[in-house]
Amino acid sequence: MAHGNHNIEITNQQFEFTSKQKMFTYIMIVLGIVLLAVGYIMGSNDHPASAHKAQTEQVVKEAGGEPAANAEGHGDLNTKRLWANLLLGAYFTFLLGCGGLFFIAVKNVANAGWHVGFMRIPEAMATYLPLGALFVVLIGGVWGVSISHYYHWSTPGITDPSSPIYDKILAGKKGFLNVIFYCGGLPLFFAVWWYIQRKLRTWGISEDQDDPGLSALGDNTNTKWYDKSVAASAFWIFFFGFTFSITAWLVIMSIDAHWFSTIFSIYNFAVLWVSTLASIHLLLIYLKTQGYYKHVNDEHKHDLGKFMFAFTVFWTYIWISQYLLIWYANFSEEVVYYNARWTSHYMPYFIANLVLNFVTPFLILMTRNNKRNPNTVILAGAAILLGKWNDLYLMIMPGVTGDYGSIFGFMEFGSIFLFFGLFLFVFFRSLTKANLTPVHHPYIKESVLHDVGV
Amino acid sequence: MRKNRKFLYGVFNHPDDILNAAYALRSTSNQILDCFTPFAVHGLDRAMNVKRSRLGIVAFLMGLTGFLLAVSLQFYTNVFDWPMNIGGKPAQLAVPTFVPVCFELTVLCTAYGMGITFFLRARTIFGVRETVFEARQSDDHFIMCFDMESKSLNIDEVTGLMKQHGAFDVKQVEMLAGK
């Protein structure tokens, strides 16, 4: 670190979305669609649905719960699997969008300064939020609830006492689990998030364009834009806490509509936050290899690595909290959730979940040198992202398709390629729209001089 | 062991000054004994050539102690000495039930062990007299001190460098201090 030199100049770099990167994202999107199509066609040619379905129903019935998850047969299992994979991809990238905004908001509220050097990365991630929210509502709310009734609670007539498939428990939940809440309520929440995201973004860019005459870093004493951002962030975190919980319940937890877990929303938040931190770190490492962000050094990466390490443990804490209480109490209506994931073909995924999300990153990121070394961080970040995908797969797939979805196929890859291609495209495009470094941010000097010590 | 020791120290007004002085002194043979600042001055530890703290190793050992304590406690009580049937769970090694206690005891021992070790090592634990050169070293002044008994210390050179980098006062003092 250059000591004592407090007139550090940062060349005001502009990100260039090269044709190579564009081509990469296009290929990812096209490959994703192709793989989804191939997987879908292969799945429908196999005609495995009836055999698997019977088996699954039996397993589920033995487990004592959620018989109708597969029994009603709205659409065959192959189509359900396609839908579940699309929901997974949409939801995962949507979480990354939320996470980018949460990163900015929580740093604003904490008056933190160390992240300012690379804060355009989470900001650009957050610009995916409206698109991600749109996909979640379209795939989950419109296709899953309104058209194909893939959510068990959305089956027509299930809350009607005169119907043969009347379900008393789901009828009791219809005030919350209904189409209006999903297709009307959620978009309302997302609109507020989007509004805040837009505001934080435009204020940040206005701050950058204020007083272009300023030369030295940290000369900007005008905190007008920053103060506004702090207030908006504080409101948003408060609002997000409630509305994200509702989102997680509706989009993911209601797949197993009879089952519920009070820790589920914070569990989803753990998934969001850990995968966001891993993504920020990986994107930062990538951008540094492209020659950007020269002033972001090992010190910042060390802190990001600490975050990844710490919240890996946080995720595990939440995971074991949900598992342990259900395991201990052993109520059949609660245990059914883990029955479908442990005493089934999903057991390898269940074990991989702990290995990828806890053991691997925990051991890799434990030492100081590994947190500062890009290669080990890439290894840990890849394990975390893969593990979080696996975690969401375990949340979604058993409830939608039963054991049918337990064999890894083309569709799983396709959905991930498609949505991550889209996400990266939006991310890179947003990066080009602003200076890579917010040179007039009040904390930019603190960020450049950031030092975690020996 | 507290005994009378002779020190040379400079008083600075600004964290940048003490940082620059520390960097300037790196190229000489004079070893800075310690710096006293009212807050953590970023980069000062690097400038003083402070070696990396071994507190992490202590933390690991403390954590391991806590973990083993938890495992042995639970194993002895729940498996060996008095196995109990609680909710039909396997009496022999019901691993998930061990997790919370292991976690808590690991965290507890790590936190307390690290904290106490740090306070001991930094000589700020209860009962240890603190070394005070100037009352304002914990307010708005920055102190850089040298051991006068050190053979490699060149008093004139150090005084000159400190003054050159903004020390407004350089003093010699004999006081009771721990090693």
Image (spheres, helix red, strand yellow):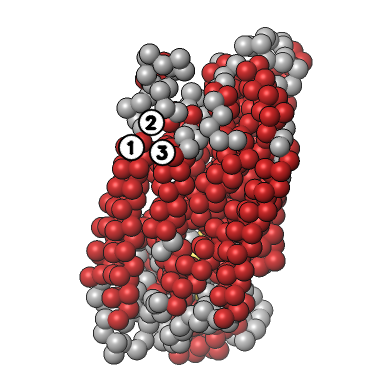
Give me the C-alpha separation between circle 3 and circle 1. 12 Å
Residue B54 spot, x, y in % from top left: 66, 57
Q: Is residue B170 above or below residue A143?
A: below
Residue A57 spot, x, y in % from top left: 64, 23
Name the mark nearer the viewer: 3 or 1.
3
Residue B96 in view here: no
Asked if badges 3 and 1 are on one and the same chain, I answer yes
Q: Quadrant of the C terminus of chain A?
A: bottom right
Q: Secondary structure at mark 3?
A: helix
Q: Secondary structure at mark 2?
A: loop
Residue with the mark numbered 1: A181
Tags 2 and 3 touching, CB below 8 Å: no
> Which comes before the other along the chain, label 2 or label 3?
3
Q: Is residue A117 above or below residue A57?
A: below
Q: Residues within 10 Å of mark 3 (few under 14, many from 20)?
A: many
* Residue B176: mark in rendering: none
Q: Nearer the viewer, residue A367 or A377?
A: A377
Look at label 1 and name its amino acid. Answer: Phe
Give me the C-alpha separation between circle 2 and circle 3. 12 Å
Q: Image point 30% across, 58% down: which residue?
A: A196
Residue with the mark numbered 3: A146
Q: Is residue B97 above or below residue A37?
A: above
